[in-house]
Amino acid sequence: MKVFVTGVAGQLGHDVMNELAKRGYKGVGSDIAEEYSGVRDGSAVTGMPYVPLDITDAEAVERVFEKVCPDAVVHCAAWTAVDLAEDEDKVEKVRAINAGGTKNIVWACQKLDAKMVYLSTDYVFDGQGSEAWQPDCKDYKPLNVYGQTKLEGELAVSENLEKYFIVRIAWVFGLNGKNFIKTMLDIGRKHDTLRVVNDQVGTPTYTYDLARLLVDMVETEKYGYYHATNEGGYISWYEFACEIFKKAGYATKVVPVTTEEYGLSKAARPFNSRLSKEKLAEAGFEPLPTWQDALERYLKEIGY
């Protein structure tokens, strides 16, 4: 099986490439840079083929796909800077990447009859209430540009393909790029006290664990919508920060505040990011380990 992976300079794409290599599959990675710009840690990703690709260029996408001819595509590339997406001069670009770029990938998959995995987000929902969102829920009410454009990407996939997996994730952390854990550790080194919101609730997702699940999926034909985060229960960002400092051995004091008290963010965030993962088990997929276990492993990976 040959798998084409977009966004390999990001957190998830990097780990998906390594997971493919572990299983002996041929992975072809892509990102917008002319040369691979992610971490070079001696892992398998550095030894896999890399193809520069601007997913917003339909002709380029078609040309690359005809050359690579993948059996499956894991589409990790996206605009993920949530606040920056709210800037008037950025909205068109965000939509071109998250919606338009996804449509280009969809059309290429159609021509090749390739399976497609589309990574989406809890942000397609409005984050109200306290019940966990179900994978097949269609009550979409995104609160911000990022969520709206990711939803447009979802619809491009579901309305035009039959062989697809739409996987919604949340609170992602991995080796490549920025994430909440790295931010907390950086701030915790410089400050004795910091404020973290305690009224936004969800579950973290370790890309190393998620990559295993995504490759499990492309080995099957169990298509549809899924939610995937680590197990271990729902927590607030405040509780996550406390656990990060505890496991890292920091004495940093964390003060819980409401989203309103915290302010700063340009984009509205969902309060309820609880994602139901029961459908994974029902389909026979192995759940991800607990986020507590994932956090310990990740901290060791980055040298804590």
Image (cartoon, rainbow, N blue to C red):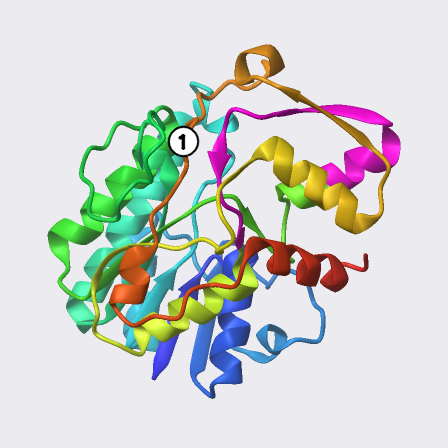
Instruction: Give the magenta range.
Output: 183-205
- Vertical placement of 61 versus 147: above or below? below
Query: Quick check: can you spot residue 51?
Result: no
Q: Within 10 Å of the Cα at label 1, are there few (<14), some (14-19), or many (20+) other Cα atoms?
A: many
Label 1 SS:
loop
> Magenta stretch: residue 190 in it?
yes
- Vertical placement of 102 versus 39: above or below? above
Task: From the viewer's perspective, tell me whether residue 193 is left or right of residue 285.
Answer: right
Q: What percent of the width, then of the height, locates residue 162?
A: 13, 63
Q: What percent of the width, then of the height, locates residue 124?
A: 31, 35
Question: What residue would you read off at disc 1?
Answer: 272
Q: Which residue is drawn at 29% across and 41% down?
A: 99
Q: Quadrant of the C terminus?
A: bottom right
Q: Which residue is drawn at 59% across and 63% down?
A: 35
Query: Quick check: can you spot residue 122?
Result: yes
Q: Say which quarter of the image contains residue 123.
A: top left
Q: What percent of the width, then of the height, locates residue 156?
A: 20, 47
Task: Looking at the picture, tell me which residue is in the foreground, 165 or 244.
Answer: 244
Q: Which residue is drawn at 39% across and 55% down?
A: 228
Q: What percent of the width, then of the height, locates residue 138?
A: 18, 38
Q: Say which quarter of the image contains residue 192.
A: top right
Q: Residue at x 81, y 24 (%)?
A: 193
Task: From the viewer's perspective, tell me whether residue 171 is left or right of residue 224.
Answer: right
Task: Looking at the picture, tell me which residue is in the foreground, 27 or 240.
Answer: 240
